[in-house]
Image (spheres, coloured by chain):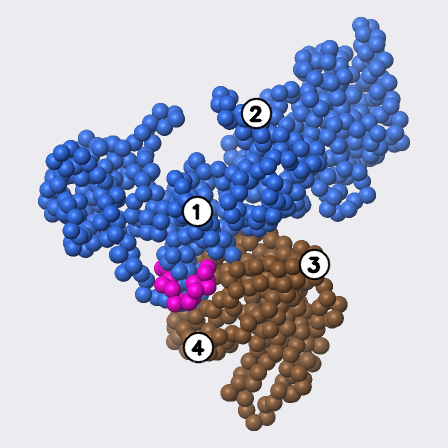
Chain colours: A brown, B blue
């Protein structure tokens, strides 16, 4: 049973934040493998399997736009939240009026991708886990549009819609993306087992297809 | 992509020619004075190094000095170049304790770096730090005024009277470069700009100066100064690992592009745009003029006039729909990078990032200029005004045509950036532009060239991008256009002309002031009355100039001939055509009846 899936993902806005532009956000031109993994994991995730993104196809021309939003500048302290969850102390809160920051963002408009990914079994696979079982689960959930939580395109406010990819989607190449486009160094994923170290890879779009190399970290998913 | 393109640009220009940016670890500082010391370290005075600039004001001299530390509120001394607070222990801010701390920090730094350097200049500097008494510094330096807050360097005067600046001495430069290597950050990782692994990661990146509207002490492009921008508990620039060399590269490249007298930056609205090519090409210096032509200054030198002529020719060809034949633009596949930055307090946000070949940009420039091309309002008006003129004219005006209100710029700043993006990418103008223009026309009734040109460009671009079945608007009057909005605009101009011919310039509130807004929005309510009114005017004209009356009446009849009824409401698109028709008909009157008007025939 094939462990690979092809998911078509689309949305009105997308923001795959570049790590260097976190305060005033700027998006990468295409979806990062890390975001793709996140979308696939929202459909089906178990400790027994680990998702590996193989390829990302870009179906729509790359269009940027800017938005400015009022946000808050601080974060609720993690330790306070942790202890409150454990029953000690009150939950932290933020008063937006005291903490306002206007932040600009360079976002993508009208995006559509096909994510090609496959999964592997991990050491946490139990007695009843086998590739066939999970492949069937994923296929059924994808057909029905089931997900554990709504996937997003980079940031939570930009919702992703997903469906199984049709052959027509796989053949769609916008004119502006024909040929080879060098996107420079792009975030591959974060190695959560190694002090959340980011890994980068050299991204090249060939006829709208981004081939993703194998992740070199010890463990990709947290 | 952005940082790596800037870094590559830095590597291309570093060390090439006099205009080159400083090498790693050094910066071009605006130095105002030098602290003169003799070989034994005795203080001799502070010499003012400023030269008079074009306007006669003293301008600081740009010198290559060791990179000053990026400091905001803390104390961090610079090596061999700093302000009087650090180098002399006395500043003009009235905080002697802090100044004493600064001096101590500076002394410590110089001792660390120079204690084992065997050079008379080094010894002189160290002797100065040993012997200088901070306590009476204030009196000794009282005469120097504003020099104390600017950048100062050391100058060692030897017995024979010759002098040399400390930062030029090779031994001291080498000491600085060695310290940089030793100082390299302990944290190593993969640099996201170059992709190299195990490079030292910069904790703080330098600041970018020269972006309009940002802090004058410099803003950061990559910054994590709010905790909401950090992730996974990482601090400062460890959130985005960039190697020290790459960080220096992109910051220096950007500062170099943004320098005051540079040719590779422009400001439109709130966006500061910088552009550069991937390799050396003569088009690099002219690129900005393609989209934002310069305005020839009043007393232009022969060079400036020639340059303006050159770009004017290229733009004329573009506006006519042809490609420019200037050899600078011959090589069309050179890749150009455009970065638009917007300020937000101490940070910079990326407003625009466009990568494309020179050919594609020339194509977009061609569309842009063809869309904006419009018969001029006055003779001698530049056919290709700079972009800020268009945006500036969108502000509300009062009865005399002056801009009303002081803060009318605020809302337009974003619009300026959006217009620039549309011009550079060939994309649509912001949706709000059409309604803004119609609002302006209705509220202050100034139908000026920049506004109408933008209106024409908006309509034409909409026709082109949405494949509407309408023909694109032409530059001057098109008598064959049948769209009802256009014809009504022409009719209104004709009726206004009739009124003016009847009463001369003594009309206080003509039909334009009283009826234009309603004529453009709801023609059916207004035009029947205006036509009746025009009959009275024509009667008056017939008494003196029968020929003129006949011509004007005939023109009005021709225009009405194609209008079947007056519509009760005009859509915004039709209203746009109304104002365009009005403007073009009015300009046509100047051409045809040059005897009547004061202006000369403008070039069509």
Q: Is the same chain shared between marks 4 and 2?
A: no
Q: Between label 3 and label 1, give the one nearer the viewer.
A: 1
Q: Is the same chain shared between marks 3 and 2?
A: no
> Is B250 on the left or on the right of A6, as rendered?
left
Asked if disc 3 and disc 4 are in contact, CB closer than 8 Å, the reply is no
Q: Position of residue B593 (x, y in %)?
A: 75, 14
Q: Secondary structure at mark 3?
A: loop
Q: Is residue B336 magenta?
A: no
Q: Between label 3 and label 2, give the one nearer the viewer.
A: 3
Q: Nearer the viewer, residue B134 or B400?
A: B134
Can you identify the residue that label 2 sits on? B402
Can you identify the residue that label 1 sits on? B13
Q: Position of residue A105 (x, y in %)?
A: 54, 54
Can you identify the residue that label 4 sits on? A193
Can you identify the residue that label 3 sits on? A174
User: What chain letter is assigned to the residue under label 1?
Assistant: B
Q: CA distance from mark 2 to mark 1?
A: 45 Å
Q: Nearer the viewer, residue A166 or B18?
A: B18
Extreme residue in the bottom direction: A127
Judge the density around disc 4: few (<14), some (14-19), many (≥20) Cα neighbours within 10 Å: few
Q: Is residue B193 magenta?
A: yes
The quarter of the displayed image where residue B262 is located = top left
Q: Secondary structure at mark 2?
A: loop
Q: Which tag, 3 or 4, sits closer to the chain's start?
A: 3
Q: Between label 3 and label 4, give the one nearer the viewer.
A: 3
């Amino acid at each position: 049973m094939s462990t690979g899936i092809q998911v078509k993902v689309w949305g009105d806005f997308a923001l795959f934040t570049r790590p260097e532009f976190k305060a005033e956000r700027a998006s990468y031109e295409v979806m990062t493998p890390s975001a793709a993994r996140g979308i696939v994991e929202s459909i089906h995730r178990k400790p027994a399997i680990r998702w590996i993104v193989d390829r990302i196809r870009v179906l729509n021309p790359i269009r940027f736009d800017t938005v400015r939003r009022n946000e808050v500048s601080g974060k609720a302290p993690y330790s306070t939240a942790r202890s409150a969850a454990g029953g000690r102390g009150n939950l932290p809160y933020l008063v937006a009026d005291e903490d306002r920051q206007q932040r600009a963002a360079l976002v993508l408009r009208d995006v559509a991708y096909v994510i090609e990914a496959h999964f592997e079994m991990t050491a946490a696979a139990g007695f009843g886990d086998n590739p066939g079982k999970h492949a069937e689960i994923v296929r059924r959930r994808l057909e029905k549009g089931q997900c554990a939580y709504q996937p997003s395109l980079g940031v939570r406010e930009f919702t992703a819609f997903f469906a199984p990819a049709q052959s027509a989607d796989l053949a769609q190449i916008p004119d502006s993306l024909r040929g080879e486009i060098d996107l420079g160094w792009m975030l591959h994923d974060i190695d959560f087992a190694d002090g959340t170290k980011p890994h980068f890879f050299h991204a090249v779009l060939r006829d709208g297809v981004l081939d993703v190399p194998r992740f070199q970290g010890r463990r990709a998913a947290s | 992509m952005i940082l790596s393109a800037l870094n590559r640009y830095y590597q291309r220009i570093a060390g090439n020619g006099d205009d080159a940016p400083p090498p790693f670890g050094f910066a071009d500082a605006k130095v105002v004075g030098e602290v003169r010391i003799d070989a034994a370290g005795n203080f001799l005075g502070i010499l003012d190094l400023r030269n008079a600039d074009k306007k006669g004001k003293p301008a600081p001299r740009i010198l290559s000095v060791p990179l000053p530390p990026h400091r905001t509120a803390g104390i961090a001394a610079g090596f061999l170049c700093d302000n009087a607070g650090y180098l002399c222990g006395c500043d003009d801010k009235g905080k002697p304790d802090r100044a004493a701390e600064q001096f101590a920090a500076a002394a410590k730094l110089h001792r660390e770096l120079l204690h084992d350097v065997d050079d008379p200049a080094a010894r002189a500097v160290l002797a100065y730090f040993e012997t200088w008494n901070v306590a009476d510094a204030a009196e000794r330096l009282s005469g120097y005024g504003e020099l104390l807050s600017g950048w100062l360097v050391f100058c060692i005067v030897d017995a024979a009277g010759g002098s040399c600046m400390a930062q030029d001495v090779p031994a001291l430069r080498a000491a600085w470069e060695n310290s940089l290597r030793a100082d390299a950050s302990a944290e190593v990782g993969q640099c996201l700009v170059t992709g190299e692994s195990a490079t030292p990661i910069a904790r703080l990146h330098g600041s970018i100066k020269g972006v309009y509207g940002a802090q004058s002490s410099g803003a950061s492009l990559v910054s994590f100064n709010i905790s909401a921008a950090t992730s996974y508990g990482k601090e400062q620039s460890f959130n985005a690992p960039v190697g020290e060399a790459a960080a220096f590269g992109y910051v220096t490249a950007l500062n170099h592009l943004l320098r005051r007298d540079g040719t590779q930056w422009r400001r439109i609205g709130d966006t500061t745009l910088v552009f550069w090519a991937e390799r050396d090409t003569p088009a690099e210096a002219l690129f900005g003029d393609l989209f934002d032509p310069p305005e020839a200054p009043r007393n232009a030198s022969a060079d400036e006039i020639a340059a303006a002529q050159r770009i004017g020719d290229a733009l004329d060809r573009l506006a006519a729909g042809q490609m420019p034949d200037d050899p600078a633009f011959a090589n069309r596949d050179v890749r150009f990078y455009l970065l638009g930055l917007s300020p937000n307090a101490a940070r910079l946000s990326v407003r625009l990032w466009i990568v494309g070949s020179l050919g594609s940009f020339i194509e977009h420039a061609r569309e842009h200029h063809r869309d904006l091309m419009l018969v001029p309002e006055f003779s001698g008006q530049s056919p290709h005004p700079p972009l800020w003129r268009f945006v500036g004219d969108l502000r509300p005006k009062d009865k005399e045509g002056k801009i009303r209100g002081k803060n009318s710029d605020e809302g337009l700043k974003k619009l300026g950036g959006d217009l620039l993006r549309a011009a550079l990418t060939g994309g649509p103008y912001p949706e709000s532009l059409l309604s803004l223009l119609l609002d302006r026309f209705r509220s202050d009734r100034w139908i000026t060239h920049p506004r109408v040109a933008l209106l024409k460009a908006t309509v034409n671009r909409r026709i082109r991008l949405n494949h509407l079945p309408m023909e694109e608007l032409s530059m001057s009057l098109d008598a064959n256009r049948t769209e009802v909005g256009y014809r009504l605009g022409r009719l209104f101009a004709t009726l206004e002309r009739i009124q003016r011919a009847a009463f001369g310039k003594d009309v206080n509130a003509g039909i334009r002031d009283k009826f234009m807004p309603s004529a453009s929005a709801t023609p059916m309510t207004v035009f029947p009355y205006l036509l009746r009114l025009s009959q009275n005017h024509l009667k008056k004209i017939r008494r003196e100039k029968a020929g003129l009356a006949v011509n004007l009446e005939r023109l009005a009849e021709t225009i009405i001939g194609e209008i079947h009824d007056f519509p009760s409401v005009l859509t915004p698109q039709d209203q746009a055509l109304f104002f365009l028709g009005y403007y073009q008909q009015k300009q046509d009157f100047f051409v045809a009846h040059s005897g009547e008007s004061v202006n000369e025939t403008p070039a069509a």
